[in-house]
Structures are given as C-alpha cells and as structure tokens.
Image (cartoon, rainbow, N blue to C red):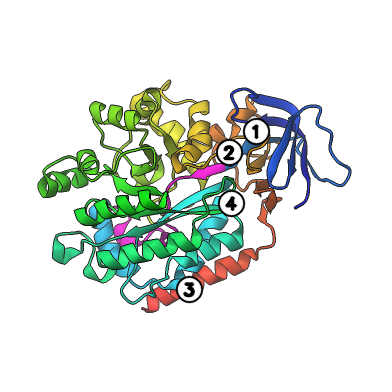
Amino acid sequence: MSTIAIKNAAVVVTMDPEIGVLQDATVLIQKGRIVEVGKAVQVPEDAVTFDAKNSVVYPGFVNTHHHFYQSLFRGVPEVQSAKLFDWLTYLYPMWAKIDPDILFAASRLAIAELLLSGCTTTSDHHYLFPAAAPGDLIDAEFEAATEMGIRFLGTRGSMSRGESKGGLPPDSVVQTESEILKDSVRVIDKWHDPSTFSMTRVALAPCSPFSVTTDLMQETAALARDKHVRLHTHLAETMDEEEYCQETYGMRPLAYMESTQWLGEDVWFAHGVYFTDEELRLLAQTRTGIAHCPVSNLRLGSGIARVPQMLDLGVPVGLGVDGSASNDSSNMLHEIQTELLVHRVKWGVDSMDVNKVLYTATKGGAQVLGWDRVGQLTPGWAADLSVWRLDTISSVGFWDPVAALVMGGRFGAADLVIVNGKVLVQDGRLTGIDHQGIVNDAKKAIRKLKEN
C-alpha cells in the first residue's frame, strides 16, 4: 500500500479536539493509517502526492442508515406524495422481485454515489428477503462493498410479521424466525470482522415493530450479544407507528424496545422522530444511538427529529441518507446541508451550527456504528478522508472554508476520496471502476424489475 501525501491543504478539518483546524497543512498516509497531520510534515520521496493548496480536507463522512436496494426505485410516481405506511404498502410487491443480480447492481449504484459525495464508511439495513430469492441474497451487498472499497457495516435485517399475522408487509417477503436466526449466524460468521481497521462488519437488524414479532426481537438481541455484534432497527419514525405500538403492544415504541432488551450502547435506531423528554433522557443514559435521516423524514412528511436536544443531552447521533426510494439519492452533501437548515426552521437559527453538523456526519456517525478510530484525522486513525476544491464556481467565495460543504451543499463530486489508504475517487471520478458500467447494470436491473 503506497505512502500518500496530501500537501499544502488550504484547510484540514481534523475533527480532533486537540488538533483542531489546520491551515496550509499536509496529511501523510501509510499502510491505511494517518501517520502525521501538520505544517512541517516530511514527505518521503517515493510518496504519491496530491496538491491541495486550493482545497479543504475533511474526514470521510459516515452514513449510519441506508437501504441499497431502493436505489433502483427512485421517484416511483404512485408514491411520490405518500406517507410511510402507504408508501411501504405500495412498494412491497415491487420489492418482492429483487434477486442477487438486482441487489448487486443497486448496491454498486448506491456505493458509487456515496463515495462521490465524500462518504467512506456506510451501513446498510437490508431486511427484504423475498421467498423466491436465494438464502444468501444479502451476500451481494458485501460483495459489492468489497469490490468498491468502501468501509461497510452490513446489517442482516428481517421481517417475520406478515399481513396474516397483523403486520404491514405481505407474506411473500417475510421469513420464519428459524430461517432468520440461522442465516444471521451464517452472515456473522462469514462477513463480520471485529478488528479495529476492518472493512466489513455485521449487525442484526429486524426491520421495525410493525413487521417483526416480539419473539424475534428478543431472540435477535440475545444472538447479537452472544456474537458481540450491534443491533439496529427503525423506531419512532411516524405517528402511525406510535399508534400501532400502542394498539398492538400497549406501550410507546421506545418502551416496547426497552421491554425486549433493545437499549444500550450496542443499539442504534433509525429516525427517532417522536421521542418525549423522558425518552430522550433514557436514550442518553443508556447511550443508545440515533441515525438521523432528515431528507427522508421531510420527503415522507414524517416529521423532524429532536436532534439539537439529543446532542445537548449526549445522545449519540449520526447522519443517514436512508433508502433512495424515500430520499431520493445517496448523497451525503444533500443530507448534511438539510440537517443544518431543517433544524433552524424548527428550533431556531442558533439550534444547529456547522460544527454540530460535521460532528454527526463524521465522528458522531462512527460512534453510533461503534467504529473506533474512524471519523477524525488523527495520527494512528483510519486513512479515510475527502478533499473538496475551493476554487470552483460552486465553492469560491466562502470566507469560512470549514463551512463550505455544510452551507454550500451541492458541490458536485469530491475531488479526492481515500478509504483505508486507497484512492477511490480522483478528479471527481471513481478510480478503477467503470462509471458507465454501473449505470448500465442499474438500467438493466430496472428493466428486469419492470418486466416482472
């Protein structure tokens, strides 16, 4: 693995509280790690160098919630103005046609867009296992992530409560509890690497309180803790979900999670829009994380999560793009700027600032995923970063370069993205990957879905 030097950067945003923000600095990378960050870095003669004198360097962004397969279902006309339950009910039968080739194409498309928008670590919540699909369907995601080079936490999701048992999804896309638990063990044993700088990890992720039985929630929690992996699910996303939990379980969503042993620093929930003051304090006390998905929550009219209050209380919070069928992109820049703006409208202009947004997009997200030594540019940490030019039409004129991406939002593709010490994006294009091939494979998969 080559030595890499990013030289003379106009600004390096380290997200390390001791190092802070550096000007006219160099970042030195060796063997997939940050070796040195500073102004007087000695660069070896054989190093691959990049001149960043007109650029700002950030830690790679961390995406804490996604659904890769939905990248092939953007802007479906019939649900462009639907709320969550109606949106799901319409799309489930379409999603039931997914096979490994379709999932592989969708995953590559999602990962490509994430990388180009500066994301270097991503999770994915795959809970859809149609009856017609092979048992190892989810492996297509890990294979795509490995090929593309992104740091990946894949969650083995599940749905066991179909329509016949009072759930929302059709029975054609749910599995038995024994099938789910057996394959969960297989996926962990095959793909989970708990080492500090690993490239693939696994979490277990029943889909939601309205698509999974209580027994499966409890058994999944026990299995995850036995295998030392994390737990993830959707929670408190809409008022419909709250009403469902009250009617079905006789309690609010978070109380239901607590009753099934689903609180703790090894757990993170997607969305978390509807929490009371007492529930926020419980999340903070138990160190239970939240994947904040502002664009999806706005797109579906679900609501605005209480993120400023969460951060004030010390709840772990990271950003998530959610699935492209409710976003409709995998663009971290879009998510970052939306987080800044939506909370200012809801809670006041001083409720969300640039530093808070960058925190959730980097080290906050890494904390939610439990990934140590990821999310800041510190010697000895993972060499995951993105570089953005400050001399383009969209970026020139920012008096505060640290705020450029957060306030400017749509800067196009990153100039340079490095993951684990490898250059995956250069000059705004993926390296070693056929851009058009990703597009063509995605279009082919969409035609296959429409034919079915």
**Residue underneath mark 3:** 101
Alpha carbons under labels 3 and 2: distance apart: 34 Å
Question: In the rendered structure, which disc, 2 or 4, sits on the residue that comes first in sequence?
Answer: 4
Alpha carbons under labels 2 and 4: distance apart: 19 Å
Do tag 1 and tag 2 residues touch (Cβ < 8 Å)? yes
Q: Position of residue 31 (x, y in %)?
A: 72, 47
Magenta span contains residue 77:
yes
**Residue underneath mark 2:** 373
Per the rendered image, the range of residues in magenta is: 61-82
Question: In the rendered structure, which disc, 4 or 1, sits on the residue that comes first in sequence?
Answer: 4
Question: In the rendered structure, which disc, 4 or 3, sits on the residue that comes first in sequence?
Answer: 3
Question: For the residue carrying disc 4, how many other residues have a C-alpha within 10 Å: few (<14), some (14-19), or many (20+)?
Answer: many
Image disc number at residue 115: 4
Alpha carbons under labels 4 and 1: distance apart: 21 Å
Alpha carbons under labels 3 and 1: distance apart: 39 Å
Residue drawn 65% across and 25% down?
A: 21
User: At label 2, which amino acid type do we have?
Assistant: Arg
**Residue underneath mark 1:** 378
Q: Nearer the viewer, mark 2 or mark 4?
A: 2
User: At label 3, which amino acid type do we have?
Assistant: Asp
